[in-house]
């Protein structure tokens, strides 16, 4: 469900948890990596809301630079018309994917973005951290950046396989080198937390190798599509001040002080591994220079690979998220990336893996458990399941004693859920190990399946109606807990479960559940 709450409606007493995705380049339509990052951020946003926090979630698009200008020219449209169209593709995709962002910032937005980007520039100037220098370098349009001679392979950009342009121009430079020590301290002490630990170490070694000042502008004559440098119309901001500043302009910097003071600093920037330096070094240095507080954390996710390889047009393995969403639904897409891909590592996306996970977990696992339980509740109890003594029908676990004989041990269903499943889930979610949090949900689904196998309510009904009702009550209770736990990942599925089973699952005395028939199976099996 799209969250409609706007920033002005946010409770002004509590500082909301402010999280962002990176802003995607608008040089091409979104691919699966963009969809992944948005889903990851959305799951975190929804989980924070679920535990009662106010949240402000920002995403957007990065719309300037020579590559975009070139693309627009190729298509024979103005740069603005071009980015309007691509930005809309991103908005449409995020809407389809049920991304609950509170706002969407576009760097070509002259009202919302430019004043803040220029104010940040002025703040950096005031610290004496910008100077002009003649610069000669290799510029790769694909990278949208300068590369050093060392990085060239046979004279070509290693990433794009193209010869860079040799550019000689006068640019503004930012004194990044000045901030090496303080950045190292802040990252080491976790004042600026970089997650996971491996990425923190990576960025610390990068800083320790020494930081060079960075080019901060391009001449207007060579890149006319950008945010103009204040008081110097011959220059346009280079990506850093133009794009990274979205995180502050998106929450009012330079136009709405009240909103900015409420929301900044960001609690979390969610980004991919390729842009770690920009977020954990360049961006905090710029903020320090301008006298602004630093974001609290940067969560760095891995890359989605396609059939084990980096996606590329030439290999022809680029995954279009829309294909999956249109065919299997947004919830199935969200589930796959959340369950099967560790946020902190690269993860492989293949059609077969998608189908196997869907069939195994959603069709045969969750969907089947729900439909069997609902069917029995209707058939045996007309959809009204009253508890008698549900804790007396525990999970039965078969264990082997040291002497080798089987012993049966029972743990109440609600006891297992409260003591084992929920704490494990919470621990994983709080550490952003979303895939592990979902694993604990699927342990519960498996245990509930085993519970049906152990008690055979479809046979038990013939001899003990009350016990059968308690068995079903326990499963319905479990399903409502599952519904809550999966809601950040599959909000619509969660709603369907809660429309199907109504009742109270708080700690109070157990109350009756009323069960409605399912209109259709929750997840129909994919036949392939
Ligand atoms: N515009 C810059 C970010 C500026 S933030 C101030 C940019 N754009 S991007 O479109 O190239 O990438 C957007 C995000 O998608 C980045 O976090 C990037 O890491 C992520 N991904 C790009 N390809 C990806 C995969 N194959 N898999 C997962 N995420 C990937 O960088």
Image (cartoon, rainbow, N blue to C red):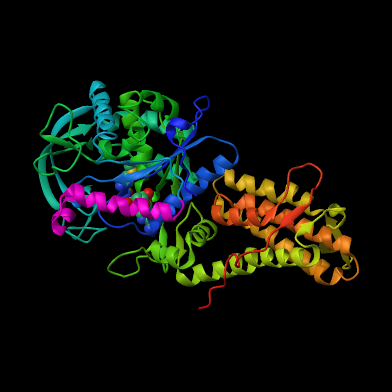
Q: Position of residue 9 (x, y in %)?
A: 47, 31
Q: Position of residue 444 (x, y in %)?
A: 70, 58
Range of magenta residues: 69-98
Q: Quadrant of residue 413?
A: bottom right
The residue sitting at the top extreme is: 126
Look at the magenta stretch and give its main secondary structure.
helix
Q: Residue at x 54, y 71 (%)?
A: 356
Q: Residue at x 34, y 23 (%)?
A: 291
Whether residue 207 sits left or right of residue 515 in the image: it is left
Seen in the picture, residue 24 relative to 450 is either above or below; the reply is above
Is 308 a magenta residue? no
Seen in the picture, residue 341 relative to 372 is either above or below; the reply is above
Seen in the picture, residue 279 relative to 334 is either above or below; the reply is above
Q: Nearer the viewer, residue 196 or 75?
A: 75
Q: Nearer the viewer, residue 32 or 524?
A: 524
Whether residue 277 sits left or right of residue 432 in the image: it is left
Q: Residue at x 75, y 64 (%)?
A: 378
Whether residue 390 sits left or right of residue 80 in the image: it is right
Can residue 412 be seen at all in this image of the molecule? yes
Q: Residue at x 46, y 46 (%)?
A: 100
Seen in the picture, residue 151 relative to 472 is either above or below; the reply is above
Q: Position of residue 416 (x, y in %)?
A: 76, 52
């Amino acid at each position: 469900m799209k969250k409609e709450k706007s920033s002005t409606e946010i409770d002004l007493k509590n500082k909301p948890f402010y999280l962002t995705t990176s802003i995607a380049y608008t040089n091409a339509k979104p691919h699966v990596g963009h969809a992944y990052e948005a889903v990851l951020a959305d799951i975190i946003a929804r989980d924070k809301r679920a535990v009662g926090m106010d949240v402000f979630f920002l995403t957007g698009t990065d719309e300037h630079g020579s590559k975009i200008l070139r693309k627009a020219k190729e298509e024979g449209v103005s740069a603005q018309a071009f980015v309007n169209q691509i930005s809309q593709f991103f908005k449409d995709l995020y809407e389809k994917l049920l991304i609950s962002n509170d706002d969407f910032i576009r760097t070509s937005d002259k009202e919302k973005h430019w004043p803040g980007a220029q104010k940040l520039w002025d703040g950096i100037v005031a610290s004496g951290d910008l100077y002009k220098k003649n610069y000669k370098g290799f510029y790769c349009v694909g990278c949208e950046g300068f590369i050093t001679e060392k990085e060239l392979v046979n004279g070509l950009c290693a990433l794009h396989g193209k010869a860079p342009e040799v550019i000689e121009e006068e640019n503004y430079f930012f004194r990044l080198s000045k901030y090496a020590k303080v950045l190292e301290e802040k990252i080491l002490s976790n004042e600026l937390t970089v997650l996971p630990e491996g990425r923190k170490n990576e960025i610390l070694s990068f800083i320790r190798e020494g930081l060079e000042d960075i080019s901060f502008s391009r001449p207007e004559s060579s890149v006319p599509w950008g945010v103009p440098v204040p008081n110097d119309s011959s220059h346009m901001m280079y990506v850093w001040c133009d794009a990274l500043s979205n995180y502050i302009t998106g929450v009012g910097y330079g136009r709405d002080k009240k909103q900015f003071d409420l929301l900044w600093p960001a609690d979390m920037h969610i980004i991919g591994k390729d842009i770690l330096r920009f977020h954990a070094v360049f961006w905090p240095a710029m903020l320090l220079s301008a006298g602004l507080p630093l974001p609290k954390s940067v969560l760095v996710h891995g890359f989605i690979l396609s059939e084990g390889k980096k996606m590329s047009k030439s290999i022809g393995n680029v995954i279009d998220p829309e294909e999956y969403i249109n065919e299997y639904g947004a919830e199935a897409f969200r589930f796959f990336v959340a369950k099967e891909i560790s946020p902190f590592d690269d993860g492989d996306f293949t059609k077969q893996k998608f189908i196997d996970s869907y069939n195994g977990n959603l069709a045969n696992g969750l969907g089947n458990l729900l439909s069997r339980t609902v069917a029995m509740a209707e058939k045996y109890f007309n959809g009204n399941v009253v508890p008698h003594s549900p804790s007396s029908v525990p999970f039965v676990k078969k264990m082997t004693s040291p002497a080798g004989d089987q012993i049966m041990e029972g743990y109440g269903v609600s006891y297992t859920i409260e003591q084992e499943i929920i704490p494990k889930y919470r621990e994983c979610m709080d550490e952003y190990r979303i895939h592990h949090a979902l694993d604990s949900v699927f342990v519960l689904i498996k245990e509930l399946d085993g519970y049906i196998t152990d008690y055979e309510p479809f046979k038990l009904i013939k001899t003990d109606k009350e016990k059968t009702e308690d068995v079903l009550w326990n499963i319905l209770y479990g399903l409502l807990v599952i519904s809550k736990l999966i809601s950040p990942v599959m909000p619509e599925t969660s709603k369907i479960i809660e429309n199907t089973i109504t009742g109270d699952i708080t700690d109070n005395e157990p109350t009756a559940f009323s069960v409605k028939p399912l209109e259709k199976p929750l997840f129909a099996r994919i036949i392939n």
